[in-house]
Each structure stands twice: as structure tokens, then as C-alpha cells.
Image (spheres, grey):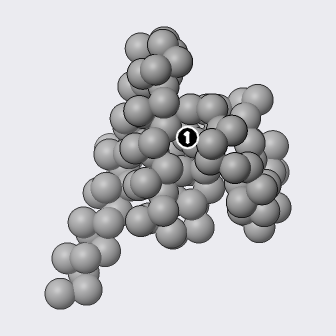
Amino acid sequence: NASAAPSLVIFDGFVGYDSVIASKLDEAKSEVDAVLSSKATSGDLNNTCVVYALSKNYMDAESACSEAITKAKKENVSRQTLRAMKSNLKIVTQQIQDYSSAAD
């Protein structure tokens, strides 16, 4: 299959990164749950989104991705970073649509 599906982008230096890279999803979930969203940066929220998505918790993933994008705009992150976050949101939204159409 030559077509590369878009893949989720997780950011180094933010919550859950090391655990996800080490394929320790349960550890990543614990780390994500420990970060209060009020203190979370857009990078933390992005990684929270990825951890939820990898756990197939797409509704919470969508919420975290949306929040990451909103916060990223306030933080004036790079266009590349914002693009990665928007791509993650698009992947998660697609998963929700696929799931809901499969459930019909």
C-alpha cells in the first residue's frame, strides 16, 4: 500500500512523550491525567490528544486537540507546530466519523 496515511505528531519535551515513544501507553495516560489542563501548554495538550487517540478515546482526543490549537494561537507557536496540531485534530475527527459510520 503506497499511500501513507497521515500519522499523529507527538512533541518532544511535553507530557507523555517519553512513554509514548517507549510504547508505554498506560504510563502516558497516567502522566496526561496528572497534568491540570489549566497549567498545560499547547504542547502538553497536543500530546494529551495523541495519547487519547492512541487509546482510541477519540472524543477526549478531539477536545484536547481543539484546546491545543486555541492555546497555540495565543502562545504564537510556529506555523509548522500549528499545522501538526491541526493535522492531529483532522486525524482524530476522521476516526470519530469512521467510528460513527461503522456503528450505523
Residue 47 placed where, x, y %?
62, 43
Instruction: Say which residue appears at 51% left-offset and 69% top-offset.
Output: 56
16, 22: nearer the viewer: 16
Label 1 packing within 10 angstroms: few (<14), some (14-19), many (20+):
many
The residue under label 1 is which amino acid type?
Answer: Asn
Mark 1: which secondary structure? helix
Identify residue for label 1: 46
Residue 11 placed where, x, y %?
64, 32
Could you say which quadrant of the image residue 9 lies in? top right
Q: Is residue 14 above or below residue 48?
A: above
Q: Is residue 44 above or below residue 94?
A: above
Residue 87 placed where, x, y %?
38, 37
The reply, left or right, for residue 101 in relation to residue 34 is: left
Q: Residue furthest front?
A: 38
43, 104: nearer the viewer: 43
The reply, left or right, for residue 22 in relation to residue 102 is: right
Instruction: Say which residue appears at 43% left-offset and 54% top-offset.
Output: 63
Instruction: Say which residue appears at 41% left-offset and 65% top-offset.
Output: 59
Indicate the quadrant containing the C terminus: top left, top right, bottom left or bottom right: bottom left
Q: Do we see residue 56 in this rendering?
A: yes
Instruction: Say which residue appears at 57% left-offset and 60% top-offset.
Output: 52
Q: Is residue 28 above or below residue 5?
A: below
Q: Is residue 85 above or below residue 97?
A: above
Q: How many marks?
A: 1
Residue 4 placed where, x, y %?
38, 43
The reply, left or right, for residue 19 in relation to residue 6 is: right
Q: Do we see residue 24 in this rendering?
A: no
